[in-house]
Amino acid sequence: MARTAQIVRFLLKYRHAGVFSGLDLDAAVLAAGEVPPTAGKPEEFVSDLEALGPTFVKVGQSLSTRPDMVPPAYLIALERMQDHVAPVGYEAVREVIEDELGVRISKLFESFDETPLGCASLAQVHRATLRGGREVAVKVQRPGVSEQVRDDLDALASIAGRVDHSTDLGRRMRFADWVHEFRKTLLAELDYRIEAQNLDRFAEHFEQYPELFVPSPVWDMTRSRVLTMDLVRGTKVTEISGVRRTEQSLAYLADALMRGYLDQAFVHGEIHADPHPGNLLVTEDGRMAIFDLGMVAHVPPRQRDRLLKLLFAAVDGRGEEVAGEAIAMGTRLEDFDEERYLREVGQLVSRYAAHHASRASAAHAGTKAMSEGRLVLDLTRLGAACGLRTPPELSLLGKTLLSLESVCQALEPGLDVKRIVEEHLNQVMRARLRKSFSPAGMASEMIELQGLLRESPRKLSDLLSLLSENRLQIRMVGFEDSQLMESLQKIANRITAGVVTAALILASALLMRVETGPMLLGYPAIALVLFLIGAGLGITIVLNAMRRDHKVKPHEERGPR
């Protein structure tokens, strides 16, 4: 209860600061890329999030991918959020390692550096050497952090449920759904065996990109709270000197990185949610090392296809198709303005195409061209402003692309990221087309067609039999749960209550004329009691009508499956 109260105080502090009200921003302003004035102090908001502990550091990182929930000024501050805390003492680290692995640390490692390489809210990393001489990095979860995270998630789920039930904003945004997805992601990140599996899987997927390197986990020394993997030595992409970039072009690394991540998203259905420069190192042998793969989102095949078509249409400048795919993926709220959304998205995509067509003049003028990641994030903002709830995968893709673009620009300033994205999406589309016409794909389609042909005569015969016997029935499912039935039940209940109230008042008025039985305040007691009950019921009906009848549950309509 104390923790919940602390979280509620934090939310109340920023209730007028514009957080979670991105849906109220004007779509035209957002499309123009301008940042409207925002109340509150974004930097203070980030500091308060960090002070609430590791769960809310991750909440801030997750919110940085939701431009439909958070205004631009706060998004900028959240992107600068630092996940660095004071290190845990060596004795606590040793206790976690020995408890997880069941062996004394001196027997596991030839050497173990007590000073951590890096510290974060959930874990810290130490350099060590195995008995065979293999250099490794040991990621150790901070003691007690798992229990704290679970308690915080329970408190957040309770608050989100109440907000969804009692506010219009909650009914629109479905904060409880967001907390549920965030809970799954964060709890998976706390299990380092899942991160080790991600390392193995990403390494396998990147085999066709020799420029990319993913460290291998040491499975014998990996448990839920301890991850042991190859030690990576290299330089952060943001710390590469200008001399090195002058002597050696790093465009090949940026090209491989962008293509590899596009394959991960659209071929393998996985999005690394946090590819920031701190998780990417340029090794001494000229490769790009990728690690810290705890936050990986999985995209279902159908959603993956729609994201691919949306991004492909965007880089090709087809705004109407972009809007159509976004509508098909999202949920249309009751006040969804489709005409406005189509118009604004069309203008946004046209502006994006024009910026890239005049890239040279924009660079000469010192202005920054609109990027693919920014375009996708602006689509989510426009959807929120027009009454369309877009899926979280769309904003996550935009955030990932935006991070990758910043990395690519750090590696090779002036790199044409749009060209890389467009060329690789063309390759992915051609590969998908070839796969659909492969022998296995054709055989699958033939099996479906064979089943249809085999079952059609029997189904047609059944239909004709029902028609001839006048037994054909059409059933409407869901009518009993519709708003019409709910309204009819309210009307019936209100009429019944009104009739009962009128009968009580009328009966009490008639009994007032009969001076029988005990008296109360000069009136027959029974008549007075009936009158008070009737008056109370009448007042209750009027108050409920004034307070509740105008509130209708928002109508939501999902796109076609």
Image (cartoon, grey):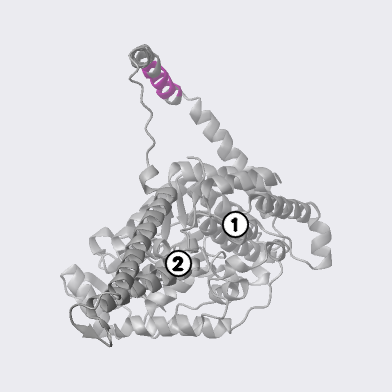
Residue at the (54%, 45%) spot, across then down? 328
- Is residue 8 found left or right of 388 in the rendered image? left
Residue 449 falls inside the magenta stretch: yes
Q: Is residue 189 visible to the viewer in this orientation of the structure?
A: no
Which residue carries the number 2 mark? 545
**Location of residue 157 (image quadrant):** bottom left
* Nearer to us: label 2 or label 1: 2
At 44% from the left and 26% from the top, the residue drawn is 441
Residue, x 41% and y 51% (percent of image)? 488
Magenta range: 442-451
| Residue 331 in view in this figure | yes
**From what the image shows, is residue 337 above or below residue 277?**
above
Q: CA distance from mark 2 to mark 1?
A: 33 Å
Q: 29 or 161: which is nearer to us?
A: 161
Q: Which residue carries the number 1 mark?
A: 383
What type is the residue that disc 1 sits on? Gly
